[in-house]
Image (cartoon, helix red, strand yellow):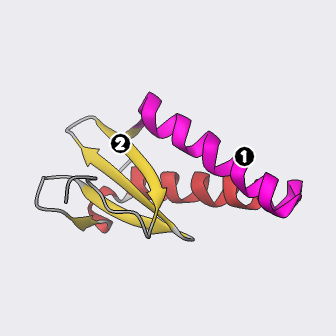
Amino acid sequence: MPAKRLIVTPKADNEIKSILADVQAYTGSIPSLIKLKNAFIERFNLIASFPKAGKRRDDGTRETFCRHYRIVYRESDDCIEIITVIHSRRKYPQDE
């Protein structure tokens, strides 16, 4: 089965950019930023190819983890939508 089209929401895109900036600021290392960015890309490709591999949540979304980050996504017939990317210690959704 071919990989589904992947859509990263503006919210998730901003979260990823913030995470990468924080990693670079904390470590002072461009290679660390690149490794994490590549890990996200690999995980997104895996989600697109095997969307049911993530743990199903009560709200109909799925989640998987990349390093210390939770990736929440929704599968439809034709695409995968990345909803949010947050540190695994944070609650999702926030009102839980």
Q: Which callout, 1 or 2, points to the residue nearer the camera? A: 1
The C terminus lies in quadrant: bottom left
Type of the residue with mark 1: Ala
Magenta-colored stretch includes residue 20: yes
Q: Residue at x 18, y 62 (%)?
A: 57
Q: Which residue is mark 1?
A: 21
Instruction: Report whether residue 3 is seen.
Output: no
Q: Sort mark 2 into few (<14), some (14-19) or many (20+) by Cα contacts within 10 Å.
A: some
Type of the residue with mark 2: Ile
Quadrant of res 34:
bottom right
Q: Residue at x 58, y 55 (%)?
A: 40
Magenta-colored stretch includes residue 22: yes
- The answer to whether residue 56 is left or right of residue 35 is left
- The answer to whether residue 28 is left or right of residue 81 is right
Q: Sort mark 1 into few (<14), some (14-19) or many (20+) by Cα contacts within 10 Å.
A: some
Residue 51 drawn above or below residue 55: above
Residue 69 drawn above or below residue 11: below
Give the SS element for disc 2.
strand
Q: CA distance from mark 1 to mark 2?
A: 19 Å
Which residue range is magenta in the image?
6-32
Residue 80 drawn above or below residue 64: above
Q: Residue furthest top?
A: 10
Q: Which residue is mark 2?
A: 83
